[in-house]
């Protein structure tokens, strides 16, 4: 393994991902940002003395962006936490994350709760972080206040979330939330499962097929249609999280073609794991909606290729080993959620390469796609003026995932024992090396990213029309 520079003034590499394609380039860094991108001829000999030549086997990627991460702090830090969670992000080449409003205590549904969460990050962030707020029955009508506090958007559920303090919205409340958010051109992101099609049970036993049958594809399709119809009526922006049902993509394609302001994401576990391969009594594979079969996975990959899917994000949602093993492997009792933040890129690249899908196809879905959804400005791009966030990756190197060696607080992974290609050998944040394998995280200088926008209060209807469409400002808060 080659020693990497701690804070280079410039990096020169044969393969750099810029504007959707790979080329050789020299990237200059000043004040933690990209100052210039210059041509670099790899045959021209040694570069200038202030330029570090990246080893030829490594590819220089923009730092990845993961807009769906549960770090569970404060309140459930025994599940994950900012320290371990952001270390896992850095180890996976992810330099910007957006934290979900649950499963922390308190849930992020008020400005005061956001302030408490922000306080819990101090001295712990290995990467940059932004925050989702929550839309629950209790805070409808006051979402503007939470938007003004700096969240990038609002998460809601259409069925029970599993956390008592984070209630779900019914159809009328969903439409009310979308209408309220449309007033300031905000974003509602939706866990789309329809409870009328979900067959909850006190016990399902250890067989995965019983759990899979309890959450059929129609539960997603019905909920997605509900969101599409409400978004069409209100004109609001809506985003469907963790789409697992490939059969739902036709409705999504039609809605997008019809001008509905809709985006969607899927996750590495849906694109790389198959129901027919999930062992019985293996709680580390349980998530909602569930991992479906190989034929369904093919449909999801088609959505990646044709652009229907806007982002690939981890939905990193860990818990303790005890919660995952509740009921001795009963899938009704095991806590749902996949730990995938650290392995997401490698899992996706391994499967994409096997399917003959080029890296240029998947990288935007793990960089600019999630950044655009969350409104994170130039995150995920190598462009002048952007933060100098990079991942140096050996795309051909293969490693065997060992759960015990991952950065997570609770050492579990559905990819445990699998061979994955694409090893992150160095992660840079604002031009400084923050992670290398073997050494681990070497700095905690991550910043908070707050979305600052003029947000009209519902009572100020006369001013609301003037504010809609005003571009929010991304504000980086240094530690």
Image (cartoon, rainbow, N blue to C red):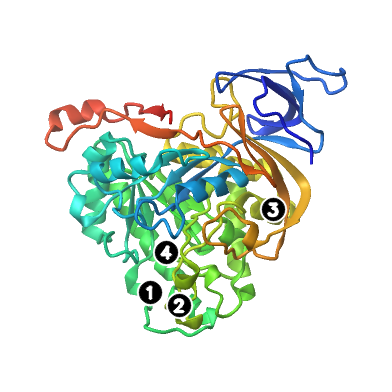
Sooner in the amino-acid sequence: mark 4 or mark 3: 4
Q: Is residue 172 left or right of residue 120?
A: left
Q: Earlier in the sequence, mark 1 or mark 2?
A: 1
Mark 2 burial class by Cα count in 10 Å: few <14, some 14-19, many 20+: some
Please state which of the two labelled residues, at mark 2 or mark 4, is closer to the viewer: 2
Q: Measure the alpha-carbon separation of dots 4 and 3.
A: 26 Å
Give the vertical position of 172 relative to 27 (above or below). Answer: below
Q: Which mark is residue 326?
A: 2
Distance from Cα at disc 2 to Cα at disc 4: 30 Å
Number of marks: 4
Tell me which corner region of the image, top left, top right, bottom left or bottom right, holds residue 414. Answer: bottom right
Q: Which residue is mark 3?
A: 352
* Gap in angstroms between the C-alphas marked 3 and 1: 31 Å
Labels 2 and 3: the sequence-earlier one = 2
Near-viewer residue (7 or 249): 7
Q: Nearer the viewer, mark 2 or mark 3?
A: 2
Q: Crowdedness of circle 4 by 10 Å Cα count: few (<14), some, many (20+)? A: many
> Contact (CB < 8 A) between labels 4 and 3?
no
What element does badge 1 sit on? loop
Q: Nearer the viewer, mark 1 or mark 4?
A: 1
Q: Which residue is mark 4?
A: 221
How far apart are labels 1 and 4 at the CA level?
A: 12 Å
Query: Which residue is located at x 82 percent, y 20 percent?
Result: 41
- Comparing 209 with 196, the one in front is 209
| Residue mark closest to the camera, 1 vs 2 | 2
SS for callout 2: helix
The x and y percentages for residue 189 are: 37, 49
Q: Position of residue 29 (x, y in %)?
A: 62, 20
Q: Are marks 2 and 3 in contact (CB under 8 Å)?
A: no
* 155 relative to 298 in the view: left or right: left
Label 1 Cα crowd, 10 Å radius (few <14 / some 14-19 / many 20+) = some
């Amino acid at each position: 393994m080659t020693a990497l520079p701690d804070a280079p003034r410039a990096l020169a590499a044969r393969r750099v991902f810029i504007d959707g394609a790979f080329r050789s380039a020299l990237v200059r860094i000043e004040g933690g940002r990209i100052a210039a991108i210059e041509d670099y001829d790899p045959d021209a000999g040694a570069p200038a003395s202030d330029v570090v030549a990246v080893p030829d086997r490594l590819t220089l990627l923009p730092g990845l962006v993961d807009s769906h991460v549960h770090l569970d702090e404060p309140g459930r830090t025994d599940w994950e936490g900012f320290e371990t969670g952001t270390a896992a992000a850095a180890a996976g080449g992810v330099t910007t994350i957006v934290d979900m409003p649950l499963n922390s205590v308190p849930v992020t549904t008020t400005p005061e709760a956001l302030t408490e969460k922000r306080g819990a990050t101090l001295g712990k962030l290995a990467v940059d972080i932004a925050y989702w707020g929550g839309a629950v029955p209790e805070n409808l009508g006051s979402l503007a206040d939470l938007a003004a506090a700096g969240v990038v958007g609002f998460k809601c559920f259409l069925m029970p979330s599993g956390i008592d303090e984070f209630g779900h919205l019914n159809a009328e409340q969903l439409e009310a939330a979308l209408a309220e958010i449309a007033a300031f051109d905000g974003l509602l992101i939706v866990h789309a499962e329809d409870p009328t099609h979900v067959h909850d049970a006190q016990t399902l036993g250890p067989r995965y097929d019983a759990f899979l049958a309890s959450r059929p594809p129609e539960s997603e399709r019905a909920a997605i249609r509900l969101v599409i119809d409400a978004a069409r009526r209100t004109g609001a922006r809506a985003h469907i999280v963790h789409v697992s049902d490939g059969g739902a993509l036709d409705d999504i394609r039609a809605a997008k073609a019809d001008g509905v302001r809709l985006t969607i994401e899927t996750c590495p576990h849906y694109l790389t794991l198959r129901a027919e391969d999930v062992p019985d009594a293996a709680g580390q594979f349980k998530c909602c909606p569930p991992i479906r079969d190989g034929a369904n996975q093919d449909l999801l990959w088609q959505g990646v290729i044709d652009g229907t899917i806007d982002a690939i994000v981890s939905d990193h949602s860990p818990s303790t080993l005890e919660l995952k093993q509740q009921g001795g492997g009963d899938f009704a009792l095991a806590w749902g959620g996949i730990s995938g933040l650290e392995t997401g890129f490698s899992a996706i690249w391994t499967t994409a390469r096997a399917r003959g899908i080029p890296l240029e196809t998947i990288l935007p879905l793990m960089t600019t796609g999630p950044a655009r959804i969350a409104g994170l400005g130039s995150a995920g791009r190598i462009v002048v003026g952007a933060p100098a966030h990079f991942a140096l990756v050996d795309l051909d190197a293969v490693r065997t995932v060992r759960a015990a060696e991952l950065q997570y607080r609770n050492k579990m992974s559905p990819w445990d024992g699998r061979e994955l290609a694409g090893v992150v050998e160095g992660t840079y944040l604002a031009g400084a090396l923050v992670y290398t394998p073997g050494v681990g995280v070497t700095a905690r200088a991550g910043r908070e990213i707050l979305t600052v926008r003029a947000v009209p209060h519902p009572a100020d209807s006369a001013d609301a029309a003037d504010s809609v469409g005003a571009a929010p400002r991304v504000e980086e808060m240094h530690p």
